[in-house]
Amino acid sequence: MAIKLYDSLSREVRELRPPHPLGAFRFYNCGPTVYAPAHIGNFRTFVINDIIRRLLELEFGASNVKHVRNLTDVDDRTIGQAQKEKRPLAEITKKWTDLFHADCASLNCIPPHVEPTATGHICEQVDMIDVLMKKGNAYRSADGSVYFKITSFPEYGALSRIKERELKITNSAFDADHKDDVGDFALWKAYKPAEDGDVKWTGPQGAAEGRPGWHIECSAMIKKHLGDTIDLHTGGVDLLFPHHENEIAQSQCCNGTTFARHWYHSEHLLVDGGTMSKSKGNYYTLGDLVTRGYSPMAVRYALLAGHPRKQLNFTLDSLHAAESALTTLRAYRATLPFTGTASDVFTPVFAALEDDLNTPAALGALFTIVNRRGGDAGSGSFDRVMFALGLKLDAPAAPTTDIPALVKALAEKRWAAKQAKNFGEADSLRRDLAAVGWTMLDSKTEYKLEPLKK
Ligand code: AMP
Ligand code: ZN
């Protein structure tokens, strides 16, 4: 079966083209900016990309896939954080990179084959900017910065379908002072001692000392590690404009060929109806949730429960449902006879995943099979499904807290009252539970007891 995926450029669901017979499938996923902990919104994007990586391996063979994901370790935000903490940039970015790796491992995300850093690719970025200046796609401004001239690339805006007028409005808030045109974007930023501390490198020819703009790093790292044309480029929906639009402009003008054959953007994770974001501070990290007693696998499961191209509102209730789904899967796995991977009983699960990554439909199909029991399901074919979803069932379950008998009895009474739609009594029992320091978190089918925070 072929993998079908929405392509943000053509705006249709298309089959992913197989890799060139002589090479691997070249897959690039924009990585995190390492100045703060990645939140579970970021991890929604990375878990979805991990499913893509797994499907590619199943489709083309593990050795025929090359996956690159960068680390943005120099930009306004990372430098700003280092300045705020009065510590070296590398110390800040290492700390958050280490946590990111640990969280990825807990969420069972397969590491990319190459994980390049922006600071490790300054020469490649400078070389690319030199080419763009020579070709007339970039110019040096009065302060020694370098800008990309968007009028030199008539296809600018094809991905985001942004019109010139909207572009001017969108960009007018940014540093318009040194540019020829407000739509132009920075390839190289001249050093500003008050803002940049000791972060600076020798620039492109004729430019001042400084640092690369954000967008050029992905173009340069892709060129180095995957070549001039890649098979799939992905990221969260916020990266579509301007980041990916700018990557296309830089790479196509420099290399003279198609940059990415397929573009995929996944939607955001929301909390209380708003986008979870580091700058807003309204986020949960994986660590926050583990501290509250949830397992990383439940977090992964909950992140897969919504369609990747639709926004998903995060709730703690979804984690309870996820924990119990995992318990069911563990129990089911234990009943299966030991077999190889050849069985078509789970075909509907793969069909849903390969149909534009419909993870909720895949989980639905899985539970239809699990609840039916029987068929020719065996451990091998089930483990293949768990591989595709990246669900590690041997991961430790959430720690349990000893629940006093009185609390259990109150909870049972309240649950029964709620089922009988006797909401007044249910509310009064909830208050009784709170009085003894406990709360009940309800899903549609079950509840979980949690101690109230002191
Ligand atoms: P950043 O660390 O800000 O560069 O973001 C890393 C990745 O997370 C990018 O692909 C973003 O598009 C994605 N992202 C940021 N916020 C969210 C969110 N609330 N939900 C899902 N993905 C997100
Ligand atoms: Zn990027």
Image (cartoon, rainbow, N blue to C red):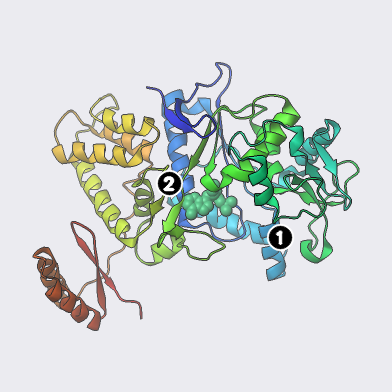
Confirm if mark 2 falls within 8 A of ligand 1.
no
Which residue is situated farthest in the right direction here?
206
Dot in front, 1 or 2: 1
Residue type marked 2:
Asn
Q: Is residue 260 left or right of residue 324?
A: right
Q: Position of residue 96 (x, y in %)?
A: 59, 58
| Label 1 packing within 10 angstroms: few (<14), some (14-19), many (20+) | many
Give the number of the disc on residue 79: 1
Q: Is 45 placed above or below 361 here? A: below
Give the number of the disc on residue 337: none
**Real-space Cα separation, disc 1 to disc 2, in angstroms:** 30 Å
Q: Residue at x 32, y 57 (%)?
A: 319
Res 117 seen here? no
Q: Position of residue 34 (x, y in %)?
A: 61, 55
Which residue is situated farthest in the top direction here?
21
> Mark 2 = which residue?
108
Q: Is 210 placed above or below 347 here? A: below
Q: Position of residue 327 (x, y in %)?
A: 24, 51
30 or 334, which lies in front? 30
